[in-house]
């Protein structure tokens, strides 16, 4: 939910050169893992922000609009509790894709 909410907030009041606001959720099985990708065509992030998005208390939202805990807690749950991976790729003015990879347990 954090990813979907963040994507929606990023696209509010924004005219995108890539068309109307869009969020796409992809799922697939790959090499004994389940992969979920959440892709948006929002404003994207520069490299400095992209490197920090999983840090506790880091937020790009104005004061009172975000705690900076959503993605850091999600990162911890995915990587530590489930042994998965959580990555982000982003291009300014084109969008962002978060990839979650969870091992399939037998």
Image (spheres, rainbow, N blue to C red):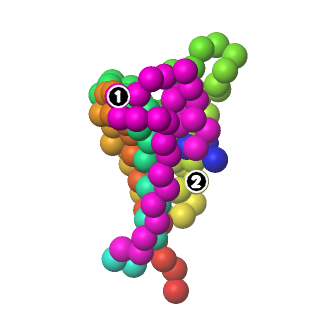
Tell whether 35 sits left or right of 72. left
Q: Secondary structure at mark 2?
A: helix
In this rendering, is residue 21 above or below 27? above
Q: Which residue is mark 1?
A: 17
User: Residue 93 location, x and y as percent?
Assistant: 33, 27
User: Residue 4 location, x and y as percent?
Assistant: 58, 44
**Cα separation between marks 2 and 1:** 34 Å
Dot placed on the residue nearer the N-terminal end, 2 or 1: 1
Tell whether 90 sits left or right of 53. left
User: Residue 37 location, x and y as percent?
Assistant: 44, 55
| Residue stretch rendered in magenta on the structure | 4-30
Q: Nearer the viewer, residue 49 or 39?
A: 39
Q: Nearer the viewer, residue 49 or 79?
A: 49
Q: Are marks 2 and 1 in contact (CB under 8 Å)?
A: no
Residue at (43% x, 47% y) in the render: 39
In the image, residue 79 lies in the stretch drawn in magenta? no
Q: Is residue 50 visible?
A: no
Residue 89 falls in which quadrant of the image?
top left
Label of residue 77 in the image:
2
Q: Is residue 17 visible?
A: yes
Residue at (43% x, 70% y) in the render: 28
Between circles 2 and 1, the one closer to the viewer is: 1
Q: Nearer the viewer, residue 92 or 87?
A: 92
């Amino acid at each position: 939910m954090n990813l979907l909410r963040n994507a929606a907030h990023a696209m509010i009041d924004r005219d995108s050169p890539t068309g109307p606001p869009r969020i796409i959720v992809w799922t697939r099985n790959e090499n004994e893992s389940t992969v979920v990708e959440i892709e948006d065509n929002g404003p994207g992030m520069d490299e400095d922000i992209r490197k920090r998005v999983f840090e506790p208390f880091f937020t790009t939202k104005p004061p009172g609009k975000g705690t900076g805990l959503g993605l850091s807690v999600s990162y911890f749950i995915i990587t530590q509790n489930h042994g998965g991976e959580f990555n982000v790729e982003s291009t300014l003015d084109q969008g962002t894709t978060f990839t979650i990879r969870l091992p399939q347990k037998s």
